[in-house]
Every structure is written in structure tokens, then in C-alpha cells.
Image (spheres, helix red, strand yellow):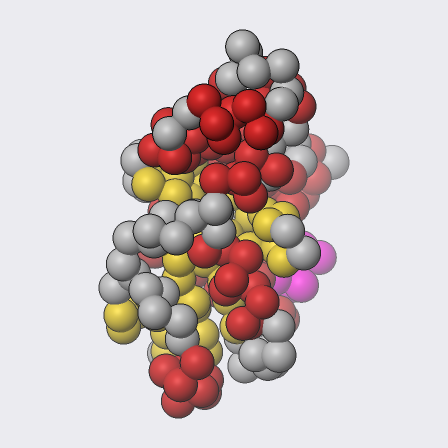
Amino acid sequence: LHDTLNSLIFDNYNGEQLFKYRLFKEYFSHQDVVGAFEIKVNNSRADFLSINGHSSCFEIKTALDNFSKFTKQASDYMKAFEYNYLIIDKCHLAKAEEILPNGFGLWIYKNGKINKIKKARLNETIDHETQLKLLTQKELINIFPEADLDRLKILERYSGATINSRFKKALKKRYSKRWKFLVNHHETIFPVDLQFFFNNNILPSNIYYH
């Protein structure tokens, strides 16, 4: 049943699940990175995030999506992450080139692969207060133990570079276990279920063959 559903979806529906799988398989499944799916940033939700020295955020627009929320999404992502990318279906190329924010990278899904069209530039407009708001109280205590959960005190006491560095460290710790599980088991996971197994580190054999 899982095999049949996976084939039906991936053969007939170029949706977000397919894009996420191609992104993972082609660029991140063998790299020394920590990645995560569906990261909440203010009122937006980034489709994918990778951390490997730098933080890189990816927003996906399939052929079934529109760009009505993209301006707000892009603004939110640029407050938190160092490199930001838009991944689009080929049908959106003209629209994407028209509205792509300065500094954003552009990748395109075409003929079954994701290709890089434009490099992202290092984002120098990060809002460090936004970064702090994305962390839990436990994470704030761990990386700023002397600040007593006072974000204003952190902003006054630490440089932007230090906040950004510790922000990435916290996110990497948050997602590393789940990401490592996904990388270690992805060969036995149907592509359509990739995000499910990231969120739920259950052995694939317990799901598929139980």
C-alpha cells in the first residue's frame, strides 16, 4: 500500500513532498549538515532549513502554489537566516524573477531535478530579536545562562555576531538527532514519507511491515 501510494503521488503530482524529497536527495542527504522541515518564523513557516556553518532557509512554490504570501514570507526569513532561497516549479520562473528579493537565491525544478539558477548573498539585515524569539526558554537558558531569559539584556550585552552564532548552535542541537535518524534510514523510507519520519523517529520497518 505504501509503495502504491508513493508511486501514485510521485508519478502524478508534482507537489511539495516531491520537491522536499528531491532537495534532500540531491543536496543534503550526504552532507555534513543538520536540516529540518517546516520551521516557524513569525507568522510564516519555512519549508526547509539547513545549518552547516551558515543557516540557509528554503521556501518552495510548486506549480499548484501562488505567490500571494511570498513577500511576507521572504521578509520573515530574512530576519532570521543568513542565506535564503526560493525553489520554484519551472512554470513560475518569470514571476519569480520579477518579485525575487535582493539577496535571495533561486532554484528551479525542471525535468525531475532541482537546478541552481541564482546564488543567494549573505544576508546582512538579520534581526537578532527575531532570532531570540524563535528559541525556547530552555534553549535560551542553555546558550545565554547568565541572562535570566531577558531578551533585552541579551541584545544589550551580546554582539549580533555572537547571538547569530549561538542561535545556529541552538537550532543545530534541536534538530540534530531527528536529522541524523533521517539520513541514516532514508534509503528504506518511501520519498512521500520523508517528513513524517523526520518528525517521528520510528524505524521504517515498524511502519511498513508491522
Q: Who's the residue at 54% across and 10% down the image? A: 146
Q: Tell me the quarter of the image containing the N terminus.
A: bottom right
Q: Position of residue 79 (x, y in %)?
A: 48, 51
Read off the magenta span.
Answer: 1-7
Our reading of the magenta stretch's main secondary structure is: helix
Q: Quick check: is 129 in the magenta stretch?
A: no
Q: Is residue 113 visible?
A: no
Residue at the outermost front position: 156
Q: Who's the residue at 40% across and 75% down the image? A: 100
Whether 190 is drawn above or below 19: the answer is above
Q: Position of residue 181 (x, y in %)?
A: 51, 31
49 with respect to 130 (left or right): left
Q: Who's the residue at 64% across and 51% down the image? A: 42
Name the image quarter holding residue 203. top right
Q: Position of residue 192 (x, y in %)?
A: 59, 57
Whether 13 is drawn above or below 209: the answer is below
Q: Is residue 167 visible?
A: yes
Q: Position of residue 87 (x, y in %)?
A: 43, 68
The foreground one among 205 and 78 is 78
Whether 16 is drawn above or below 188: the answer is below
Whether 78 is drawn above or below 172: the answer is below
Residue at the outermost top position: 146
178 with respect to 22 (left or right): right
